[in-house]
Image (cartoon, grey):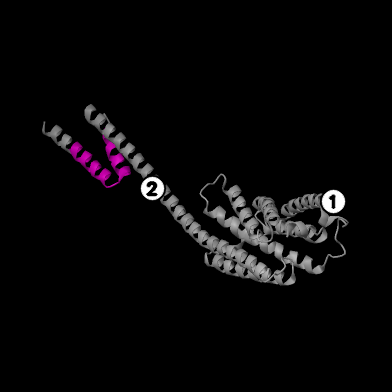
Amino acid sequence: MGGMKEKFDDTLHRLNLASRKVSQGNYTEAAQEIFSLTNKEKYSGIVAEMAESFGMMIVKVEARNMHLKNLIEELEVKNDQLEKEMKLRAEASRVLLFCVGCLGLYTISFAFIKDYFDISSVGILSTIVNIAVIFSIILMTLFLIVGSNRSLSEFGFNLNNWSKSLRESLLVAFVISLIAIVLKYYLINNHNQFVGKSIFNLEQSSLYLVLVYFLSAPVQEFLARGIVMTLVETILFIPRFRTGLANVVSALIFGVVHLHLSPIMGLSSFLLGLIFGTLYARHRTLLGVSIAHFIVGEVALDLLDLTPILY
């Protein structure tokens, strides 16, 4: 009897040690200790069964704890990602508000100055003021972007898929130019301001206008698509329609900025903004869309001289 009691006490002692190891998180050692008691040749059936049940409980507890540990690690990673995204959205909001605020102030101020001082929208003085103000806005916006530790490549300053982007942009510019030529032909036959004019305005076309469009096209695309569209995408929480909504918002702002020139110019700029935004969204480079913008502007405002209906 004494030997059986000592063996039983030893069994309980080993079970107790295994329980302590479980409470300390030493599941492997506890499992080894418990499963050594499942040998029915050394221990009674009830002890072996109890050890086996206890061992299965340890395995389940360990599995559950491992699952919880993995979940906690995943939550920590997602929390870090969320914090980074929130910080990125906050910085994007700050830059976007500054940029849109400056563009709004520019639009209102220029409309007032143009009417008050009777400055032509297409004159040299108007062009110089436009370029100076836009470049000032870009420099200040670039300063904020650099301060936010974001790469300029995120805003279209790259050559990603430049060949495909260039081909698509040239094709789009060609189609829009054809539509503009058809429109000019229609105006010559139906609009008093165009009667008697030729389709192409080659005599009055100037290197000055070519240079202006060559400089202003990439600048406008950087502001509208590179900055505004990219920042709106960053801020929006709707993954599925984020790019489309950002394109519409940037096109609206692009149209409003041109609205002081004329309602037709504002509407045309909005529609072209949607097309240019689609091109930009496809390749995320300003190269192709800037060239398309330059070609369309040069054809419509210089070679075809559609300014009487646009300004």
Disc on the earlier residue, 1 or 2: 2
Q: Residue 304: where, in percent of width, then height?
A: 82, 58
Based on the picture, tell me whether residue 87 belongs to the magenta stretch.
Answer: no
Callout in the foreground (1, 2): 1
Per the image, label 2 sits on a secondary structure element best described as helix
Per the image, label 1 sits on a secondary structure element best described as helix
**Which region shows up in magenta?**
10-37
Image point (85%, 50%), residue name: 189
Q: Which residue is mark 1?
A: 185
Q: Which numbered tag is attached to residue 72?
A: 2
Image point (37%, 46%), residue name: 69
Q: Quadrant of the C terminus?
A: bottom right
Query: Tag count in the figure?
Result: 2
- Hey, what amino acid is under mark 2? Ile
Q: Residue 100: where, in percent of width, then height?
A: 57, 61
Based on the picture, tell me whether residue 12 belongs to the magenta stretch.
Answer: yes
As drawn, 60 above or below 108:
above
Q: Quadrant of residue 222?
A: bottom right
Q: Which numbered tag is attached to residue 113?
A: none
Magenta stretch mostly in which secondary structure?
helix
Residue 192 or 80: which is nearer the viewer?
192
Q: Quadrant of residue 18?
A: top left
Determine the residue located farthest toward the left in the rendered image: 2
Q: Residue 170: where, in percent of width, then height?
A: 77, 53
